[in-house]
Amino acid sequence: MRTIDSPQPGPNRATGGDVSPDTGSRRGLEELLAEWIGLDPSTLGAASLSRACQRRLEATGAADFAALQALVENDPQQRDLLVEEVVVSESWFFRDEQTFAFLETFARTLAAMPGRQPLRILSIPCACGEEPYSIAMRLLDAGMPAASFTIDAYDVSHACLVRAQEGRYTANAFRNAEQGFRRRWFREEGSRAVIDPEIRKLVRFSWGNLLEQGFAAGQGTYDIIFCRNLLIYLTSEARRHAEATIDRLLATDGALVLGAAEPPIMSGRWAPAGATSMFALRRQPSGERAAAFGQLPNTPRRTGTPTRPRAASLAGTAPPSTAEHPRTATSTSDSTATTPLAAREAIAEERATLLTKAGELANAGRHIEAIAACEAYARDTGPSPDLFFMLGTLYQAHGDLDRAEGCFHKTLYLDPVHEEAALALALVAGSRGDERMADFYRDTAARIFARKGSR
């Protein structure tokens, strides 16, 4: 729910662009941001980072970026203000309904176990409170007593925490089609909706940085941790540190809820927490790590050469023989370096055939069949940008914008110069009336085109 410079994950792209006279000094600020909050500058983009630094330059009256760097290094308040410029909260209540459906089922299951109450839930980063408040509302609406759970919410933005504690929201925070929760848990005050004090008191907000040593030390473990759309913006070193901290804080049989594009970048021993919860992970107790898009709970582990699921047989076409191009159960991106060229070419040809057939089914209005086939193929072979782009297109045509959006983000994560995915995200944002994000993704696509044209 928390993003950097944009409300949803963007491509992991190189900064590119023209080099200004102050670029060297600005890179010093980039290094500080990477040290403080783990930010990978390439995920923000050179232009956005430059604008953020420029705003602080003007606000402080510093002579140049070098002077600003010296200022923020020696003044914690100025450091926090710079962080505020680059870490922008943009969220809404009950973002991604399937996430909260999973929460309800998982929480009620744990709560039924002897000695498990109260359940402990962590939301980090919590932005302006939409996520932890959504958690509280969903559990109460599911019939769980307020005393049966606790919610801790952390963020690095002091301004966000102030707004979260105030609990006053504009219409932008209510993008969910179902508005019953607003009538139950908010009162209207002019153009603002104010959250019920009963909900507000269920969330404990605190300032905190997941990357700091000893984060939430002494707080015990959590049964459910929400950490959505943060890891994708971190450097690889920061991501490893964050994952280690999450591992320390998560109960042995707890669940970790991530953003749609994040399970594939986890390096530890994780497995999907359920057959329909690709975004939620649990620890893999033994054996090899299950790929985030592969092995599902209660499914026999594959050994040797995997077989093609029946769903991959489209429109009566028999699935190709796996004997011609054996592959492992690891993801395509992980195994590319060790797979023989001929086998990789065969896999690519097979995938192209599947995508063609999926397109034919879609043109015939048989979206559900096409989606099922693509998802089965992804579980068997691992992620690929063209497969996720096709899935995003299918979900979009089927009217499921949340899943479409997640697939397009995965496409950009795997292929940072996939301009069609950026344009598709612009269309999704536009259909929701979010013109700022639509412009952002159109600009992203334009930069990709420009970089490709300059090669």
Image: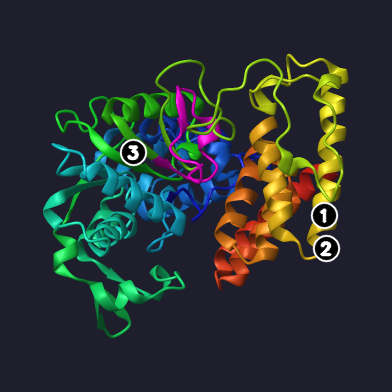
| Residue that numbered label 1 is attached to | 359
The image shows residue 135, relative to residue 210, as above or below, that is below
The image shows residue 331, relative to residue 151, as above or below, that is above
The picture quadrant where one finds residue 317 is top right
Q: Is residue 335 left or right of residue 349?
A: left
Q: Magenta part of the protein: which range?
A: 257-278
Q: Is mark 1 on a helix, strand or loop?
A: helix
Give the label on residue 363, or none: 2
Q: Residues within 10 Å of mark 2 (few under 14, many from 20)?
A: few
C-beta proximity under 8 Å, tags 2 and 1:
yes
Which part of the image, by quadrant, shows the C terminus? top right
Tell me the amino acid under the disc marked 1.
Gly
In magenta stretch: residue 418:
no
The picture quadrant where one finds residue 242 is top left
Please report the residue visible at 83 percent of the width from the left and 63 percent of the height from the top. Answer: 363
Query: Front-most of 107 and 46?
Result: 107
